[in-house]
Each structure stands twice: as structure tokens, then as C-alpha cells.
Amino acid sequence: MKLFDVNVLVQAFRSDAPDHATFRKVLEQEVNAPAPFALSRVVVSGFLRVVTHRKVFVPPTPIEPALAFCADLIGRPTFRWIEPGDRHWMVFRDLCTQLKADGNLIPDLWFAALAIESGCTWVSGDRDYGLVPGLDWQYVRG
């Protein structure tokens, strides 16, 4: 099952994003496939934070169309929520220790641990995930 990063949703949603067409195609292929796909509630809130932020996009997206985009994804019959389970903290802690994580790598490892624990393929435009041992990931090249 594919589990999407914030950057995939942002790039797919914002037509003025630099790699919109590529990310839109990847997202549409996955959400229209018969196989289930997943999101984390943290990813959805991160998407809403980024697209509505006036320092990130000018003009920022009003909350209504951003929420409608999320509702469209969440309303699909193949959609699943992925939440941290009992092993998440252990996987996250081990990744942080193995990679001597600091700064911006920390939240990336939180998502990597979520994907590893749940057996999902993490889909992202962020190359840092290539450093994560045990992570099944798909790099979306813009």
C-alpha cells in the first residue's frame, strides 16, 4: 500500500508548484488504482498548513478548496488511514540512533517509522528517505 508524504500532496494540488504535473500524475495513478492507498493524519494537517500559508504560496490556498482536496482523497473507497502502532516508537528511536539524526531529519524518520511499521511504501519527493534502512520508498522525481 502506498503512503504519501506532504510534498506529494502539495505538489499535486498546487498548479503553480514547480513539479505539479509530475506529482499530480503519480497521485492520480495511485488513488485511481484498485489497490488501497493511505495517508497519515499528520500528513493531511501538514498539507493544510503548507498550502494555506501566506509565506509559502502567494496567494495562499483558501481553506475550503484545500479541505475539499483532502475530502476527495479520504472519501475514496480504497483510502485507509495509517496511525502509529505499538512498534512505532521503537522503530523511530532505532532509526534516529542508527542515523545519528538531528534537525530536519527527525520528522522524516517519524514518517519512515510509520511506513516501516505499517508495511507501506512511502512515496515522497524528498531524497533523504534513501538513507533510511529498511524503508520501502518511491522517490518522485520532479
Image (spheres, grey):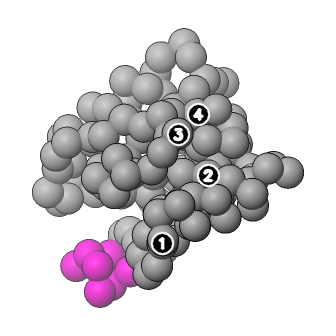
Q: Main secondary structure of the magenta part?
A: loop
Q: Earlier in the sequence, mark 2 or mark 1?
A: 1
Amino acid at dot 1: Ala
Q: Nearer the viewer, mark 4 or mark 1?
A: 1
Which residue: 53% across, 61% down?
98
- Gap in Å between the C-alphas at discs 4 and 3? 11 Å
Q: Earlier in the sequence, mark 3 or mark 1?
A: 1
Q: Which residue is mark 1?
A: 101
Q: Can you see residue 63?
A: no
Which class describes the residues within 10 Å of circle 2: few (<14), some (14-19), or many (20+)?
A: many
Q: Nearer the viewer, residue 83 or 80?
A: 83
Which class describes the residues within 10 Å of circle 3: few (<14), some (14-19), or many (20+)?
A: few
**For residue 134, which numbered disc appears in the image?**
3
- Gap in Å between the C-alphas at discs 2 and 1? 13 Å
Tag 4 secondary structure: loop
Amino acid at dot 3: Gly
Q: Which residues are magenta?
A: 53-60
Which residue: 48% across, 71% down?
100
Judge from the rendering whether residue 104 lies leftward or rightward of residue 80; answer left or right.
left
Q: Which residue is mark 2?
A: 113
Cβ atoms at labels 4 and 2 below 8 Å apart: no
Q: Earlier in the sequence, mark 4 or mark 3?
A: 4
Q: Can you see residue 17?
A: yes
**For residue 9, which numbered disc appears in the image?**
none
Q: Which residue is mark 4?
A: 120
- Gap in Å between the C-alphas at discs 4 and 2? 10 Å
Q: Nearer the viewer, residue 14 or 80?
A: 80
Q: Report if residue 38 lies within the magenta region.
A: no
Tag 3 secondary structure: loop
Which class describes the residues within 10 Å of circle 1: few (<14), some (14-19), or many (20+)?
A: some
